[in-house]
Each structure stands twice: as C-alpha cells, then as structure tokens.
Image (cartoon, rainbow, N blue to C red):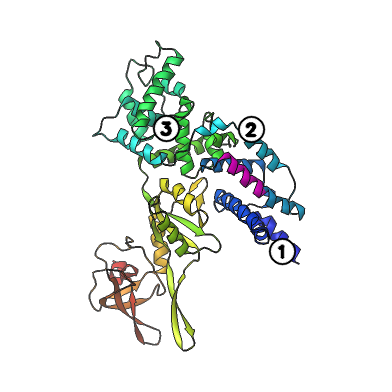
Amino acid sequence: MQDSVQQIIGLSDACVFFRMKIDATPNGRSAVSQRQALSAFERYLGGRTVGFEGFTENLLRGWMGWLFYEDYTKKTSLYYLKNLSSLYGRAVSEGLAKDNGIFSSVRERVGELPDFMFSNEVDHCVVKKLQSLVRKVMNPAVKSSLGEDIVAFAVLCGGLDFDSIAHFRKDGYKGDDPAIIEIAERYAKPKNSYLFPFRQSERTPRQLRAALGALFADALTGVGLRKFNPPEDTARWLWSNVALSCSVSHETVAGCLSGRPLLSPVFAMVSPGEVSEQERADIISLVGHTLSDDPAQWHAMHLRPGMDIEKLRERFRVYREELREPEIYYPCEEIARRIGHKLVYENRPVVSGLIFFRSRMSEIATMFRRIGDLAWCYRNGESYAVIPQSQMEVYQAAIGIFTPETRLYPAGTVDLREGDTVKIIGGPFLGREGIFNTVVEQRKGNASSPRTLFRLLLPDNNGIEWIVDTDPRLVRKVSNESA
C-alpha cells in the first residue's frame, strides 16, 4: 500500500518525492546540500508541478541557465546538479523514473563552458537603470543625446545588433510603440535612406561598429551600465535581461532574439523556443511597457508548504535595505473557539496561503530572488499574472474585507440619513436590506486611525430586528438602485 501511494505521489510531483527522501536521509550534511539544490530547482519551477516523465534535458538546461542568471557560479551549479541527480537516482532505483542519461549530458555541457564566458556579470538593477534612460528619451523637457536615443531604440525594438541599427531604414518601423515612433520621427529625414546619421556610404562595417560602440558606451555609462562582450550584442543582452525580469522563460527569450548573445552562459545552456510573430510582438510590447510605464499592479503569490505570512513579512524586514515590501492583501476572518470556559478569538485566512500583493512588474523578479523559497508567484503564460483592480474589488466585495484604496460606490451614494433604506452588496449579509441608523468608529488593533462602519438595523423573516456594523463600501441606497 505504501509503495503504491509513493508511486502516485512521485509520478505527479517529483519534488514531493525528493522532499520525502531528503527527510529520510540519515546524513545531516548530505540532507542540507540536497535541500539547497531542491530549493533552487523549485524556485526555477516557480510553482509548476513536474513529474518524472517531465524530466528532460531541456528542463535541466533551463535550470542551469536560470542559475547562471541568478549569479550562481559554475562550480555551485554543477554541485546542485549533482545533488538533484542523486535524488533522481533514488526514483530510478524505485522504478519511478527512467535512467535516460540527461544529468550526465547536461553536466558535460556545463563543463564545456569556458571560464571567460562568465566575465559578463548579470546586473540585476538593469531594469531600473534602463527605465531612467528610456524616460529621459521620452521626456520632451529634456534633450537626450544621439547615443541615448539609439540605445533606447535598439532595446525597445527587441535587441538590435550594431549592423541592424546602422542600416535601419527610416520607414522601417511598422509597430505602434509611442517611444519608438517618437525617436524615429526625430531622425527620419526626407533625403536619407537610413534612420540614423552615420554616413553609412562612407564608412566600412568596422568603422560603423566602432562608432556605435562609442555611442553605446557613453549612453550606458550615464545610467551606470556597461557594454556587453562582444559590444554588438549589448542591446540583445539588455533586452533579454528585462524580458527575464518579467518572468519570460530563457527558451522563449532566446526564440525572440535574432541571435543569442554569444558569450552568455545563460543562453549557452538553452535551446531557442518556438515563438510566433504575435507572441514575439507581445513580449516586445511587455518589455517596452515595463521600461516606459511600469505601474504598480495587483499580483498573487502562494505560500509554500509549512510557510506563513509572518515568515514572509520577516523576510521583507531582513532585506528591507534591498527590497520594498509591497502592499499585501491577505484577508482573514475572526474565528471564535471555546477553550474550557473561555472564548478564544483567532484570525484565519479566507483562502489559506493565497496572498495578493501590489507591485511593479520590474520589481517582482528581485523580490522572488529573496522570497522564492517561501512562496511562488502566479503566472499568465510567460509573464507574471496581473489582476485588474476591478477584479480585486469584486473579490473584496464578495468577502467583505477591503484594501484602503478600494471604492465600490459612486460619489454621493453613501451620504445616508437615519432611516434610509439600504442594501448590502457584499460580505456575509450579501443581498439583505436594512435601515441605516448611524456612523460608528472602531479602533482596529494598534491602528492610529479608527475604522469607519455603518450601524444598520436588519429585520429577519420573523419580524425581529438586530443591529450589525458593516463597512460603508458594502452598503448602497436602495433608492439609488431603482433610479
């Protein structure tokens, strides 16, 4: 019976099986090493469930590329691969998985990567730095340089190499990105064939690359960035960093690029995925939106087994110098339990483990670099899932617990007088009609400001009335509904 249960668990989620085996490992040092490797693998999966049939060479290559992007060294990455291979070997010995040689193949590929390839360090502040450059280029009150315009143009277009930039036709852009259009309009001249003025007919390809390299260096130095090696791959590398920060997979990013950055260990490990023209256009648009706008939006994460909200908040406190703790919405309801002769009240999550948070898209990757062992973020395809404000308001109204900025009623509809008939539009009294009595204020916890509530008289079917206090956002005048 135990073997059959173990087989069902192992086939549906290999990581559950791995955790069972780690917990049963008598050697404490080995267990710690294997737990570290598994934690890194689960952060790479980002909440996805992978059975043993899903263990492929591409999966492991993707994990290695992700480790390099996360600044793990070649030595540490190989060590993690060895530990995960040991766990996988236990599944093979129990007949749950096949020995298909993928770990040996990936280990050999990582070993072949030259050490100098790792000199191109990943800059995890690249998004913020590029945002400052793009916003300067888009600011009509500030004059940007030719180099700054070209770098912004090359990145926003999906990562153009030097040859593509130098020979970009003045009417070559057919999209609708306002930043790209604005830059193109600055430089398009009636008598010129190419968009940017480089005296293309007078210069050799080598001279053009040198001129562009100098412009890139000056523009990037101004925002604390540097050229990639080789320099002509710089825009590709910058664009790919932004796309990866938006949770687009390494394989998809490689499929979007016209050519992979040659000396990148990240992309040396992955095979380009199949990406349609529409998918590529959508990802380029996502990157452009992140660089030029990047508003704070609602997203959702889910706590991993054994974790709780206090551990999450503590992690934010530990990294408060590096991370901005986002606005968190984790609705709880008060539950009364009788212990002996006393009633004990405790807060219980409405949906255990499901946490909503408000953050900029560009901040999420950095955030989960520090909290990924505690929780994983929901995704919509390749990117982090965005929850519209309107959907958040519907959800909050349904359970009757709100965030401070939520407004569910038109202006003036809650200007009530004693005796007004109202209808409750959310929460436990959803759909009931009552009589408005007065406004009350309650101190909640240690909050410095009181919580405003409406006191209502609610009749039941027996003609008996009782008093309840409810949030103003859950009340609407009946007269307004019928108007």
Q: Residues within 10 Å of mark 1 (few under 14, many from 20)?
A: few
Residue 5 percent location from the top left of the image:
72, 64
Q: Quadrant of residue 446?
A: bottom left
Residue 38 percent location from the top left of the image:
60, 52
- Front residue of 292/422: it is 292
Residue at the (47%, 40%) spot, across then down: 243
Above or below 232: residue 59: below
Describe the element under mark 3 as helix, strand or loop.
Answer: helix
Q: Which residue is mark 2?
A: 112
Whichever of callouts 1 and 3 sits on the residue coming sooner in the sequence is: 1
| Residue 5 badge | 1
Q: Is residue 15 visible?
A: no
Above or below 301: residue 292: above
Whichever of callouts 1 and 2 sits on the residue coming sooner in the sequence is: 1
State the quadrant of the N terminus.
Answer: bottom right
- Front residue of 308/239: it is 308
Residues in magenta, as a range: 73-84
Above or below 84: residue 225: above
Q: Is residue 429 left or right of residue 338?
A: left
Outermost residue toward the top in this view: 202
Residue at the (39%, 34%) spot, across then down: 225
Task: Based on the picture, tell me whether residue 159 belongs to the magenta stretch.
Answer: no
Mark 3 to mark 2 CA distance (whole Å) = 30 Å
State the quadrant of the C terminus.
Answer: bottom left
Residue at the (41%, 27%) spot, across then down: 173
Describe the element under mark 1 as helix, strand or loop.
Answer: helix
| Residue 155 badge | 3
Residue 312 percent location from the top left of the image:
46, 60
